[in-house]
């Protein structure tokens, strides 16, 4: 008699198969999909953020005024949270707006979770982690980063 596979083993086998064909799928998609470049405001704001120039990033984002973009709202929230002194109340509004536009925006979930930790709202951060867990089928950097931030926060308590 053949034993049925456990769900855990079946999941691992499926993940292995998907990972082995993923490079081919990405290669085919890259060859057939038209090249999509980010708008200049997004590239410029990311460069300012990368160099820790949050005030400049805020000016660039405010000039772009892309209020209907989840990326724009996310970067506004991020810049407001990271600048000195941080503006947590405004940052939270932008993260919430980003997630209203795109409920599965992984960066917004991660960064909002980190903001919630800054506000000492561990249950809120854990709720963002749970949302990320659902959005990241096979794990993702945003999930790992927020999980590490939560563990670090818990270690300080």
Image (cartoon, grey):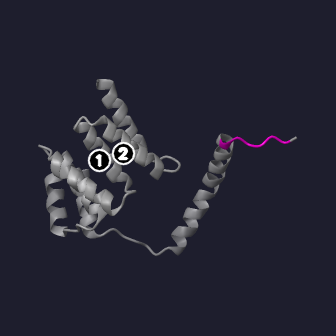
56 inside magenta stretch: no
Question: Which residue does the numbered mark 2 point to in the structure image?
Answer: 128
Q: Which mark is residue 137?
A: none
Give the x, y percent position of residue 92.
Answer: 22, 50
For the residues bearing labels 2 and 1, Cβ distance under 8 angstroms: yes
6 inside magenta stretch: yes
The residue sitting at 14% across, 47% down in the picture is 87
Tell which of 32 and 77 is nearer to you. Answer: 77
Q: Quadrant of residue 3?
A: top right
Name the dominant secondary structure of the magenta segment. loop
Query: Could you give the CA–CA distance between mark 2 and mark 1, rounded to whole angstroms?
Result: 7 Å
Tell which of 70 and 51 is nearer to you. Answer: 70
Classify mark 1: helix, strand or loop: helix
Give the x, y percent position of residue 84.
Answer: 13, 44
Identify the magenta region: 2-7
> Dividing the image into 4 quarters, which one contains the N terminus?
top right
The residue sitting at 31% across, 30% down in the picture is 153
> Dividing the image into 4 quarters, which one contains the C terminus?
top left
- Residue 142 in view here: yes
Classify mark 2: helix, strand or loop: helix
Question: Which residue does the numbered mark 1 point to in the structure image?
Answer: 112
Give the x, y percent position of residue 67.
Answer: 22, 66
Of mark 2 and mark 1, the one earlier in the sequence is 1
């Amino acid at each position: 008699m053949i034993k049925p596979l456990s769900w855990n083993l079946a999941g691992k086998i499926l993940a292995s198969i998907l990972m082995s064909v993923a490079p081919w799928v990405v290669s085919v998609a890259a060859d057939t999909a038209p090249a999509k470049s980010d708008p200049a405001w997004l590239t410029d704001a990311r460069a300012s953020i990368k160099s820790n120039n949050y005030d400049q990033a805020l000016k660039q984002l405010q000039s772009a005024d892309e209020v209907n973009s989840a990326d724009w709202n996310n970067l506004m929230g991020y810049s407001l949270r990271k600048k000195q002194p941080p503006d947590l109340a405004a940052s939270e509004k932008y993260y919430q707006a980003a997630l209203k536009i795109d409920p599965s925006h992984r960066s917004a979930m991660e960064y909002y979770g980190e903001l919630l930790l800054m506000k000492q709202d561990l249950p809120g951060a854990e709720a963002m982690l749970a949302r990320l867990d659902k959005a990241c089928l096979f794990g993702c950097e945003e999930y790992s980063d927020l999980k590490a931030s939560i563990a670090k926060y818990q270690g300080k308590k």
